Every structure is written in structure tokens, then in C-alpha cells.
Amino acid sequence: MILSLSKDTIQVLKEQDVVFLKNRVKETAVKIKMGLVNQTRLLTAASELVRNMMRYANGGVCLIEVVSSGRNNGVRLTFSDRGPGIPDIAAAMRDGFSTGKSLGLGLPGTKRLVNEFDIKSKVGEGTVITIIKWANG
Amino acid sequence: MDKIPILRMGAFLLVTIQVDLYDRLALNLEADLVQMVNNTNAKGVLIDISAVSIVDSFMGRIIGNIASMSKILDAETVVVGMQPAVAITLIELGLPLKGVHTALDMEKGMNLLKSMIEVTEEDEDQEQDDDLIAE
């Protein structure tokens, strides 16, 4: 059972919004006393996902939540966009797969950096990616 | 528009990144640096990332690109001062930065660059000696 303790929604449409979002994520992680290495993992994951959102969907919305599973607190980030969607999620989750000109590490790499990773996408409607990083985990 | 300064010191170029990189800034740095290597005939590039708290796949790729591009222009690249948390994240992300030389701090990086460049010069001297003997 995961409870949400606080909610914060941020629109990401321009490159300046990305900087603002990263700062908010960092503040949230610091607030729940997340260690430096986990903070760096979470911020790097957020950086990957927000770049995808900007590049493929021209921006979207990020929901930042502090969540609790009883003993452990964590940060949950939900990235939602109304972009083209991902036709083949299994392929997108493979290392080295990219429809753009990138290294194809974004999604599989992000999954390795966080504790929980969920992706839902519908072609023509958009993509929602949710990640959780626990303060101790 | 922000710009990351590139300093020239003898045959080397020094870059100290004091802000968290965003995409456009990183791309500009890549272009400026490669241009500078060409203009100044630099033999080595030293990039200090001790103040950078996040390197994601895009930034990692730019660092790799700078090293490869400089290499083609006959300059070695050494990245110094990477924070331990950044090193952990890069490997977990799947980006081992192959082909990029690293050193713990500026001084060690400078020594590494000097040794790499001296070795090459000695090799050239050796070749010239060999040529003389052949004649």
C-alpha cells in the first residue's frame, strides 16, 4: 500500500521549465532525507524522462509526489504527455533501441536507476511513465 | 545565452564546468571546444566536471563526442573531478564512457595529459633517429 503525502504538478514546455523541474525534484528528495547517490539516480532518471517528453511530445506535465509505504518514504514522479505514443514498448525498453538519434539508453537506463518503473502508452494519445525512488533503496 | 569559458594554457585547453549542464549549453560547448582545438593547435583538452551533479545519457554522449572529435584533430581529452555518485549513475545507466581518459583531480589530469603527449613526442624522435640510422 503506497500513500501519497504531497502533490506538486509542474508543466514542462520550455527548456527553462526543465531546470525548474529538476530543482523541485531535488528539493523534494532532500526533504525526505534521500542519500546523495539515490538523489543523483533519481535526478538522472528525471532528466532522461523529461528530455524524452520534450523531444518526442513537445512537453507535458510532471507530477511530483512524496509517497510512503509505511516504513519507507520515497519520491514518485509521473510524466504524462499527449505525444505520438510508443508503438512497441518492449522494443523501446531494450538497450540500444532508438527512433531518434540517441544512444537508446534513456528508458532501459532509467529503469535501472529507480526502484519502480511503469510505462503506459497509446499510439496517438500519449505516454505516461511513473517512477518511484525510495529514500533507502 | 550562457557560455562555458575555454582557457588556453600552453598546448592545453582547460574547461571548468561550474553549472549544471542543460542540453543547449552542452551542444555549444562541444562546438566551441572542437573549434578551439582546431584554431589553437591544442594537443590536450582538460575538462573539470567536479561541480556537475548530474550526467545523463545526453551529457555523457557529448563528453564522449568531445573526446572522439578532439582525437581526430590530434588532441587528447582528460575528464577530471567526477563525483562518485555521478560515476555510479553513469555505469548503472549503461554509459561506461569508453575512450575517455579520466583522472581524479586537475593536477593528476594535467600530469596524465603531459605524459601522453611526451610519449608521442618521444615516439616521433625515435622514428627520426631510426630514419637517420637507416640513411
Image (cartoon, coloured by chain):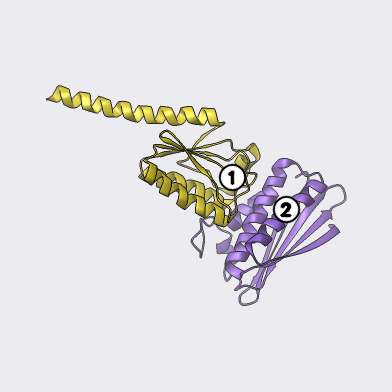
Chain colours: A purple, B yellow
| In this rendering, position of residue A137 left or right of residue B28 | right
As helix, strand or loop, the secondary structure at mark 1 comes to: helix
Measured along the vertical axis of the image, is residue A11 above or below residue B32?
A: below
Residue under the image location 54 percent in, 52 percent down: B26
Q: What chain letter is assigned to the residue under label 2?
A: A
Tell me the residue that label 1 is attached to. B90
Circle 1 crowding by C-alpha within 10 Å: few under 14, some 14–19, many from 20: many
Q: CA distance from mark 2 to mark 1?
A: 20 Å
The answer to whether residue A79 of the structure is visible from this angle is: yes
Q: Do the residues at discs 2 and 1 belong to one chain? A: no
From the image, which quarter does the C terminus of chain A lie in? top right
Give coordinates of residue B77: x percent, y percent.
Answer: 45, 39
Give coordinates of residue A39: x percent, y percent.
Answer: 72, 46
Tell me the residue that label 2 is attached to. A23
Seen from this angle, which residue lies furthest top? B133
Label count reads 2
Cβ–Cβ under 8 Å for marks 2 and 1: no
The answer to whether residue A1 of the structure is visible from this angle is: no
Residue under the image location 54 percent in, 55 percent down: A95
Residue under the image location 58 percent in, 40 percent down: B49
| In this rendering, position of residue B51 left or right of residue B69 | right
